[in-house]
Amino acid sequence: MDSRIVSYGLQYAGYLIEASLLFYLARSRERKGLATPAFYLSSLLAAEAARAWVLHAYGKASERYFYVYWSTDFLLVISAFILVCLFFRRACLQEEKIWRFARLLLVFVFVIVLGISGLIFSHNYSGPVLNFYYFVFEFNQNLYFACLVLNTLLYLLLQQIESTDDQLGLLVCGVGIQFAGPAATLALVHLTSAGRFALSLNSYAIPLCTLGMLLVWAYAIVRVRDKETRVARHKIPAFAEVTAD
Amino acid sequence: MILALLILILSTALFFFYFQVTCQKILHRQFDREYFQSIANANRLEFPSLRKSLEEFGAPVDYSRLRMMLKCDFLALTYLLKNAANVNQRYSYDERLLILYFRWQFLSLAVRRLLKVGENKAILRLTSVLQYFANVVGQRVNAVKFGNLTAADYLLNL
């Protein structure tokens, strides 16, 4: 089977799950704690819709597609960073002291990534178009890896404070799968100087990891919440006369 | 070059770590009661006794027999997951993930056996996946009313 068909298949399955999850979140009554995944899912969908529209209207070789692709990539990485920050906030809701430290750490990491990317960018000045590409590529790569490290710190923090928020634990694991897989394959592409095997692995890994994250999120949102609702319903006191009937 | 290698090693390790943690979190799901024992009895599955012997005595039975036991239980339970009281006649996505996890652990058991490290840990993980599957099957069967049939009777007539 053509590898591109498999890759497109995985991609379209991802879009379908993203849209279904968003629809589910929009329809559900209890939205507590679910605004963060909804925000990330919306940015994923918006970026994909914008890319698809520009690709359809101007073609893959056009300059507009180039700018839209890298701009949406930039926005997606920023959304991923915001997602990790919001997960940190949710984890530290009862731990104000840790949140104050985490907030400083998040700002520090962002500034460091911006500084390193700026430094590399200043060494690679090659005209406005390539300039834009160099900065966005470098910044995205660095911030993406920083998000993976921060997400792992968040997982460790959840273990440390013995968090009972099962849903958050699963959401964090999903994000970990989404960040770690592509980071590994992109590093392999870099190491093999864009070798054929690495490129082919990369074309599968990115949609597969996104799909993995979406499925874990779907489990966390639908199943874990369903369980919590059932437990909550169980706790509602019933009047004696009602139960007697 | 060194940085890329470092990122490759770290990211690959983290990917497998998150995969394992996700599966463990799904396996920790609480069932309203223990269904697995009746399912194991009805189908003569051997994983509960294997788990018990490992937890109590710490020594597994001979390796080839152990592999066969785990494989047979896995095949029986995946068949039941798909066909017993399952209207859609297909696995859910968390079940698919756990099937993948079982296969991965099965492979890891062979590697651990070669290296002689943490063999029992892998066996316990494999039995916990089987226990989860048995619990899911039991819960499904229990949810469907079969007149006077118990879960075990239903499975025996399948």
Image (cartoon, coloured by chain):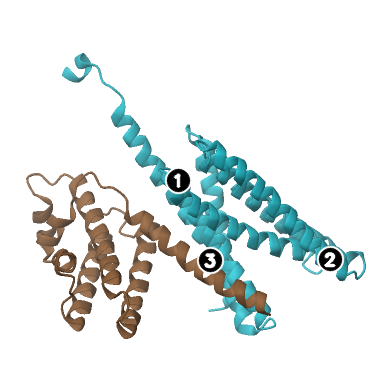
Chain colours: A cyan, B brown
What amino acid type should be assigned to the residue bearing mark 2? Phe
- For label 3, the SS is helix
N-terminal label among 1 and 2: 2
* Residue A112 in sight here: yes
Give me the residue at 64% from left, 59% from top.
A146
Quarter of the figure with the C terminus of chain B: bottom left
Q: Chain of mark 1?
A: A
Give me the residue at 91% from left, 71% from top.
A126
- Front residue (pair B128, A205): B128
Q: Are marks 3 and 1 in contact (CB under 8 Å)?
A: no
Q: Chain of mark 2?
A: A
Residue designated by label 1: A161
Q: Residues within 10 Å of mark 1 (few under 14, many from 20)?
A: few
What amino acid type should be assigned to the residue bearing mark 3? Leu
Quarter of the figure with the N terminus of chain B: bottom right
Real-space CA distance between mark 1 and mark 2, rounded to the nearest whole angstrom: 40 Å
Measuring from the top left, give residue B39's x and y in whole percent: 15, 58
Q: Indicate left or right for A216 with B130 as reference.
A: right
Q: Indicate left or right for A112 with A158 as reference.
A: right
Real-space CA distance between mark 3 and mark 1, rounded to the nearest whole angstrom: 32 Å
- Quick check: do tags 1 and 2 share a chain? yes
Which mark is drawn over residue A121?
2
Measuring from the top left, give residue B147's x and y in whole percent: 10, 44
Q: Is residue A230 above or below residue A80?
A: above
Q: Indicate left or right for A181 with B143 as reference.
A: right
